Image (spheres, rainbow, N blue to C red):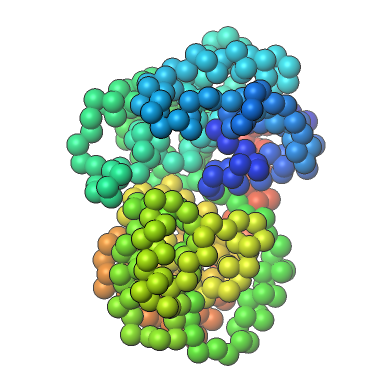
Amino acid sequence: MSKILLINTYYYPNMIGGTEYSTKLLAEGLISRGHDVAVFTCDSSNNFLKEEINNVIVYRDKIKVKNKSWLKPIYKFIELDNKFILKKLDYVIQEFRPELINTQNLYYISPAIWKYIKVKYGIPVVHTIRDLWLYCPRATFIKRNGNECKKRNIYCKLHEFINKKHSNYVDVVTAPSQYTLDFFEEKSYFINSKKIVIPNGVDININDTFEFISNRNKINKNNVVYIFIGSLIYSKGLHWLIETFKELNNENSNLIICGDGPLKEYVIKQAELDNRIIYKGYVSGKEKEEILKQGDVLVIPSIWNETFGRVIIEAYKYGMPVIGSNLGGIPEVIKNGETGIIVEANNKNQLRNAMEYFASRENQIKYRENIKKYINKFSINENISSYEKLYIDILS
């Protein structure tokens, strides 16, 4: 039995994206195997808070400036080497006494804690890369106006330089895809770290999935339902998806869009103009599961390099084939021609052809059967076992 401290900017019930879900599954999965687990986060709406959630000890600090837009530019510099977080981090380490620390997303917290932990405490540090933020402050290489960022400013270069230096203090770095590890290795990050790919996992009962697919294949229906679940931001490729969908000459089709973000009003407007487009707002938990059960095809039209695409394996849980762009780690999760179709990012012809292909019920059934052979690779048990083995190897 080991004592593991996980560090992430947010933690349940403050679920911002896939990272928070992955961190929760990891924490609770390790608890179920007899380990002591605590989480340190900075999402408290009040002062410093300690609580217990599903047997996980959660320490919540408060970053007072993070929700004040006029202070964010200042804080961007602070988080390069955040000294304000260290007092509470000391408290957590000295009270919980972890044998190993696994960091996740460190927005507002700062990767500077890697050096601090190693120098002051000598505790092994594992970092799990969840996105490309350590290189790009926006993590997407996409500007706020939706244009690709081709010229990096002084802050971006400083952000890279300092975080690269911090990464020298990480013992082991993991990522959900080989693409992600290769990206940072090419940029000379984590030069002293052992590197391991650990795919994200989803809480799945294989027998339930097989039964769901079998029952789904028996349903004879004429319409096809495409699903998009994600942040409503330019980098997710929403414009490309909606424009392509509107060109489909199929009245028996729907596009269900779930999420929240800057493009919310755009999506609402498009739903008003085309009654085949349905906007459901932000969904999570059981509501999200119900949406996935309704869908025939998931579409991931990202125009930036996703490190993985957790919603892909969530769709697999319900036997849903996936159309995804050819960027980042997405092609590692979609088995092209078997569990889904990979298309060139921003290529409307390829996306339209793929969407039309899955309008066929026979093609949907063929891909669902393929998913049954593939889904176990992404079970949460496989994910937890990989982390558990890594921790044991480090501590032995």
Specify the quadrant that holds the C terminus.
Answer: top right
Q: Quadrant of residue 267?
A: bottom left
Q: Position of residue 149 (x, y in %)?
A: 24, 42
Which residue: 73% across, 17% down?
95
Q: Position of residue 141 (x, y in %)?
A: 30, 42
Q: Quadrant of residue 119?
A: top right
Could you tell me if residue 223 is visible in this image? yes
Which residue: 69% across, 26% down?
49
Q: Position of residue 201 (x, y in %)?
A: 60, 51
Q: Position of residue 264 (x, y in %)?
A: 42, 57
Specify the quadrant that holds the N terminus.
Answer: top right
Answer left or right for 305 relative to 310: left
The image shows residue 6, relative to residue 30, as above or below, that is above
Residue lying at the far left of the rendered structure: 151
Q: Nearer the viewer, residue 38 or 285?
A: 285
Answer left or right for 185 relative to 85: left
Which residue: 39% across, 46% down?
179
Q: How many marks?
A: 0
The image shows residue 111, relative to residue 185, as above or below, that is above
Residue lying at the far top of the rendered structure: 120
Could you tell me if residue 102 is visible in this image? no
Q: Quadrant of residue 266?
A: bottom left
The image shows residue 148, relative to residue 9, as above or below, that is below
Which residue: 67% across, 81% down?
215
